[in-house]
Amino acid sequence: MKNIGWDSYQLFLDVARSGGLTGAAATSGLSPATIGRRMLELEQRIGKVLFVRSQTGYALTADGRMLLDNLHVMENAAGSIEGWRKSSATSSLVRVALGTWNAQLIMSNFSAICSERDRFRIDLFIAEQRAALTHRENDIGIRAFEPEERNLAAIKTGNVAYAAYRLRNAPQSLADRWIVVDRENAISAYLRWPYEARTEHIVVTVNKPSGLRELVLSGAGTAVLPCFIGDADPRLVREGGEIDELRHPQWLVMNNEDRHRRDIRTVADRMVRLIKQHSDLYAGRGLPD
C-alpha cells in the first residue's frame, strides 16, 4: 500500500458513496472509464477486492467496507486539522486563472463568486495561456480539454461555441474586413481560425483578444468571438452561423489535493454554477432566462 495517494482514496470514496462510476464521474469530473481503471489499479496495489461489479453499479465487499470505515476516520481527522488551521487565519487567498472572455463573465457577476460575508480573498489572473495548477501557481483554472495530469481534478462545465460577429446595422461590406489577434498571441483555435479561413481579408491585428470586440463595436470589421460574449451584446450580430469546428468542451480544473479545501471548493462550485446558468449562451443557443 506504499505510495498510494489520497486522490486514489478520494476516488474510492466517490465510487463507494455514489454506488457506481457515473455518480463518481459527476463528483470528480473524471470519465467513468478513467475511474474504473483507477479502481482496478487501487485493488491491485492493495491486494484486495473492494467492489462487486454489476450492471446496476458497484457494491462494496467486506474489504471495501473496512477501507471505507478507515477512510472516514482519515477524513474526519483531516477536517479537524483544516478547521484548526482556518480558525487561526484571518482570511485565505483563492487564486483563479482565467482567459479573457471567462474573466468577463466572472467579473460581471462577481457577487455570485465572492461576497462581503466570505472570509477568503480572490486573486484573478487573466491571460490566454494555460492555467498553471500542477505546482499550485493557481488554485482554479478553466481549460478547453480534460486534464491528463494525475494530480489535477476537473469538472465539466459544458460546451463553448464560436461565431463571427460584426456591428449590428453596419454595412454588409464589413463581412469582408477581418479583425484578428496577431499570430504570436493567437494561441487558441478560435484566434487561429481566421488565418486559416480568411487570410486574404485580414485588415486589422491586435495583440489582445479583448481588442477584437472593441474594434468590432467601432465598426472596424468582423471577428470571431465566443457566442457567450457575442450573443450577449445586443450591439453585435452574427455574420453567418456557428463555426462548428471550433466548438469544444470546457473544464474547471483544480489541484486534486486542494479541491476539498473549503474556500477553493466554495469558489469552484460557485463558478461552475454561474457558468452552467449561462450554458445555453456558451453553447450558442441565445440568452439565459
Image (tube, rainbow, N blue to C red):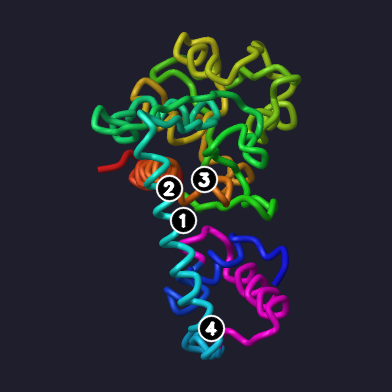
32 sits left or right of 68 in the view: right
Magenta-highlighted residues: 25-51
Image coordinates for residue 39, horizontal then vertical, percent: 63, 75
Image coordinates for residue 274, horizontal then vertical, percent: 35, 41
Q: Amino acid at mark 1?
A: Ala
> What residue would you read off at disc 4?
64
> What residue would you read off at disc 2?
82
The quadrant in which residue 85 appears is top left
Image coordinates for residue 87, horizontal then vertical, percent: 34, 39
Front disc: 1 or 3: 1
Vertical relation: 203 (above or below) 62: above
CA distance for labels 3 and 2: 23 Å
| Picture residue at 37% right of the left edge, 32% below the top | 120
Residue 280 visible? no
Q: SS of the residue at dot 3?
A: strand
The quadrant in which residue 209 appears is top right
The mark nearer the N terminus, 1 or 4, is: 4
Q: Amino acid at mark 4?
A: Gly
Residue 106 is a magenta residue: no
CA distance for labels 2 and 1: 6 Å
The mark nearer the N terminus, 4 or 2, is: 4
Vertical relation: 140 (above or below) 129: below
For the C terminus, give its image quadrant: top left
The dot on residue 78 is 1
Q: Amino acid at mark 2?
A: Glu
Q: SS of the residue at dot 4?
A: helix
> What residue would you read off at disc 3?
252
The mark nearer the N terminus, 1 or 3, is: 1
Front disc: 4 or 3: 4
Front disc: 1 or 4: 1
Q: Amino acid at mark 3?
A: Leu
